[in-house]
Image (spheres, rainbow, N blue to C red):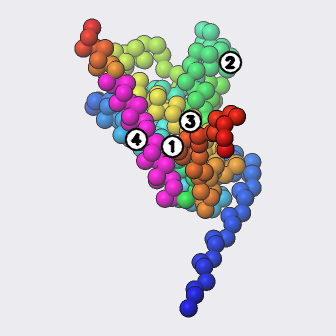
Amino acid sequence: MLFATSIYLHLPLMLLVISLVYSATRHEAWDEILVEAFRWGIRMLGFMAIVAIVLFGVSYLL
Amino acid sequence: MSSAPPAAPAPVPPHEPSMLAAFLSFLVPGLGQIYQKRYAKGILFMVSLLGMFYLGQAMGNWQNVYLPRGGHANSLGGSLMQRWHFIGQFWIGVSSWPAVWQFFGGSMPSEEKSRFLHNYQKAPSEREVNDFLVNSDKTPDLGWVYTVIAGMLNLLVIYDAYAGPMFPAGVKRPESDQAGPKPQPAAGGAS
């Protein structure tokens, strides 16, 4: 089936597009866009890592 | 010998609000920016958002952007209540208009001529949806999320075309915004 791989493989694409587009709407200069996109990428990745750790912890305890 | 200090960069002219550019970006993501000669950003928005939208549709077997008809969905409002995803998808612009066209019964190529075009953004039957979802993994769920995110991100792109970026080129982001609020002296304390 088309795209029938692990849905987690889509995460990097989603992170890249969302952080890049959002940053490009806040800045005009490309160096600033890329720095801001990197920051947002790290923030989102951190948030998802926290959620993953919490879920792993919950599933381990239950 | 003393050298003259480097000349300060010329001030950036303020971005003039443009309804036309905003409308163009609503029609096709990034078109307003291209109209404003901000080509690189326009192409970035166009490729990213349209790519995300169409990839999302493909992941959902081209059956996740539509307005249902019949039952409680006998009016546009009723249809939107039943398929609220479309409120987010709509903002991608022209790419979501076939769903509106199909809802109002506009003519499409016959099924014999092109099955894909005939059913493009047409509300699938419940049986079709069920058969597809039962025989697939979570990819279709992620597919409609892609289409909604693309539509919602285009709202930011439309605003960027209308009012320009928050920080134009040459305007540095304030330090306080980057490092959080500065500590304030205690009330009544010595300065």
- Dot 2, crowdedness within 10 Å: few (<14), some or many (≥20)? few
Q: Find the distance from the CA under tag 3 to the CA under tag 2.
A: 19 Å
- In whole angstroms, how far apart are the C-alphas of marks 1 and 3? 8 Å
Q: Disc 4 and disc 2: Cα gap in Å? A: 39 Å
Please determine whether, in this image, residue B110 is positioned above or below residue A18: above
Q: Chain of mark 1?
A: B
User: What is the x, y in percent for residue B177?
Assistant: 58, 45
- Provide the residue span drawn in magenta: A30-53
> How would you rate the neighbour count of disc 4 (Cα within 10 Å): few for under 14, some for 14-19, many for 20 or more?
some
Q: Quadrant of the N terminus of chain B?
A: bottom right
Q: Nearer the viewer, residue B49 or A57?
A: A57
Q: Quadrant of residue B85?
A: top right
| Residue picked out by circle 4 | A42
Residue B111: percent from the left, percent from the top?
48, 29
- Residue on which disc 1 sits: B49
User: Disc 1 residue type?
Assistant: Leu
Mark 1 Cα within 10 Å, few/some/many (few <14, many 20+)?
many
How far apart are labels 1 and 2 at the CA level? 26 Å
Q: Residue B177, relative to residue B63: is it above or below?
A: below
Which residue is at a point 28% across and 20% down the rendered structure image? Answer: A56
- Which one is earlier in the sequence, the residue at label 1 or at label 3? 1
Element class at badge 1:
helix
Q: Where B75 sits versus A27, above or below?
A: above
Q: What residue lies at 49% left-to-right and 49% top-to-bottom?
A: A36
Q: Which residue is mark 3?
A: B151
